[in-house]
Amino acid sequence: MSRAPPGRQTAPMAQATTGTTGDSAPPPGPTASEALRAYVAAQHADLERDLPSLDDPEAVHRTRTRARRVRSVLGAYAAHAPAAGRLRKDLRALGRTAGHLRDLDIIRDRVAEVPMATTLLDHERRGVLDDVHEEIASGRFRRMMRTLAELGEPDAWADCPEAPMSTVAQEVLADELERVFRRDRAAAQPGANRAVALHDVRKAAKRLRYAAEAGGPAYADLAGRAQALQDLLGEANDGLATAAWLDRAARAHPDHAHFAEHAREHWSSGHVDPASYEVLLAELRESSA
């Protein structure tokens, strides 16, 4: 994550400025419609490239990420994009199916040294991969890909407001930052399920990150700060998911006591370090100053 040199302040939420010479005006940046259309088209192209290669765990990861990026950006910039309620539901379905596959790949990496675990995970993965292929063959998926292709055409954006992306992103990202802080406040409430609440913070940070990326290079620092928070919470979430899988394996195979032993180790890795969390939140608060 980038940092400003000593004595120099960063302003992730500030609009990018361009120096001028004489009386010349800075070149206009893209409109929100132009920037968002290009962003969606790029994600669509990447999805088409990776979908035939889902035996590769990295292709699974990219597929889930592309689906979540488009869904997040169309949600964050909804007032400046075509209506996309059905598309976002379809992207959520793809993200969940691919996400299950990706979760198994992450767990497999974390339990590679646990006897019998990889054998069980490989068997489970084959079944989930069949589910992914079934999803890709569905009418819902074909409709989703057609809609994504249509969003790459200017006509789909003809009725959207014509406003500079620099102005739109400034407003949208302020709202997305507040979403993160609102969920953090909810996580701090007495009686809150801390693990569930921090997962909600992570999802908000992820949406902020993708919205900042779509906003353009001026918001790269903000995107990096959001990703740092997302990664911290994601590591803890992976630990909890691994422990939960090992618990299920222990119940299904009571003659293999080592599953329960390893589960206890991974439950502890699901802990979020409070100091690191507060540091990353403070950096995001600086972005909104």
Image: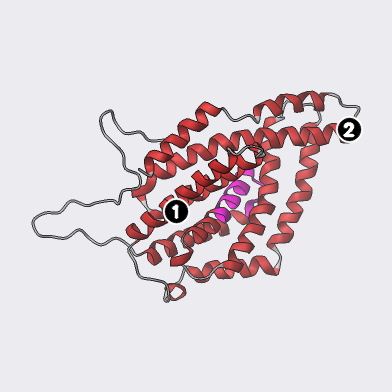
- Above or below, 127 against 44 in this view is above
Q: Which residues are magenta?
A: 52-68
Q: Is residue 55 magenta?
A: yes
Residue 167 visible somewhere in the drawing: yes
Q: Which residue is mark 2?
A: 253
- Tag 1 secondary structure: helix
- Position of 46 with respect to 191 (left or right) is left
- Crowding at label 1, few (<14), some or many (≥20) Cα neighbours within 10 Å? some
Q: Nearer the viewer, residue 183 or 55?
A: 183
Numbered disc 2: secondary structure: loop
Direction from residue 26 to residue 121 in the image, left or right: right
Q: Residue at x 41, y 51 (%)?
A: 174
Main secondary-structure element of the magenta-colored stretch? helix
* Residue 70 position within the rendered picture, expressed as x and y whole percent measured from the top left: 53, 58
For marks 1 and 2 on the same chain, the one whose residue lies earlier in the sequence:
1
Tell me if residue 202 comes above or below residue 173 in the rendering. Answer: above
Residue lying at the far left of the rendered structure: 22
Q: Quarter holding the C terminus?
A: top left
Q: Position of residue 40 (x, y in %)?
A: 48, 61
Q: Residue at x 50, y 61 (%)?
A: 74
Query: Looking at this rendering, what residue extends furthest in the right direction?
Result: 255
Q: What amino acid type is highlighted by mark number 2?
A: His
Check the image and report above or below for 54 versus 244.
below
